[in-house]
Image (cartoon, rainbow, N blue to C red):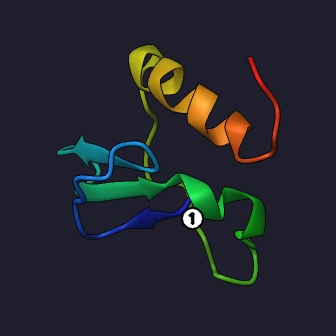
C-alpha cells in the first residue's frame, strides 16, 4: 500500500502508521491502493505490519474495491 510521509486525522481512509525499526512515520493511503503501480513508482518493501494493523486496514482496503467482508 502507498504510504505518505504525513500523518492525517482522516483515519477512515488514511491510516496512521509508525514503525521506528524501518523509519516509517506517516499514513497508509487506502484509497490509492487500486491505482498504485508499485513497479512504475519504484516501490520497495520497507517493513512488515502486525496482525492487528492488518485487521484494522483490511475492511477499508477491500471496501475500496466495492467488496464487503
Q: Residue at x 27, y 59 (%)?
A: 26
Q: Residue at x 77, y 24 (%)?
A: 68
Q: Quadrant of the C terminus?
A: top right
The answer to whether residue 52 is above or below residue 12 is: above
Q: Which residue is mark 1?
A: 44
**Residue 16 image position (x, y, % from top left):** 29, 46
**Residue 51 image position (x, y, % from top left):** 47, 16
Horizontally, residue 52 falls left or right of residue 16, namely: right
**Residue 55 image position (x, y, % from top left):** 51, 18
Mark 1, Cα crowd under 10 Å, few <14 / some 14-19 / many 20+, is few
The answer to whether residue 19 is above or below residue 1 is: above
Asked if residue 38 shows in the view, the reply is: no
**Residue 28 image position (x, y, % from top left):** 43, 53
Residue 40 lies in quadrant: bottom right
> Camera-side residue: 68 or 2?
68
Asked if residue 14 shows in the view, the reply is: yes
Q: Residue at x 70, y 37 (%)?
A: 63
Q: Residue furthest left?
A: 20
Horizontally, residue 41 falls left or right of residue 7, namely: right
Amino acid at each position: 500500500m502507498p504510504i505518505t510521509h504525513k500523518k492525517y486525522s482522516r483515519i477512515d481512509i488514511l491510516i496512521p502508521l509508525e514503525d521506528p525499526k524501518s523509519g516509517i512515520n506517516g499514513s497508509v493511503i487506502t484509497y490509492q491502493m487500486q491505482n498504485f503501480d508499485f513497479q512504475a513508482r519504484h516501490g520497495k518493501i520497507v517493513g512488515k505490519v502486525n496482525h492487528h494493523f492488518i485487521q484494522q486496514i483490511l475492511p477499508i482496503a477491500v471496501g475500496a474495491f466495492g467488496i464487503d467482508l
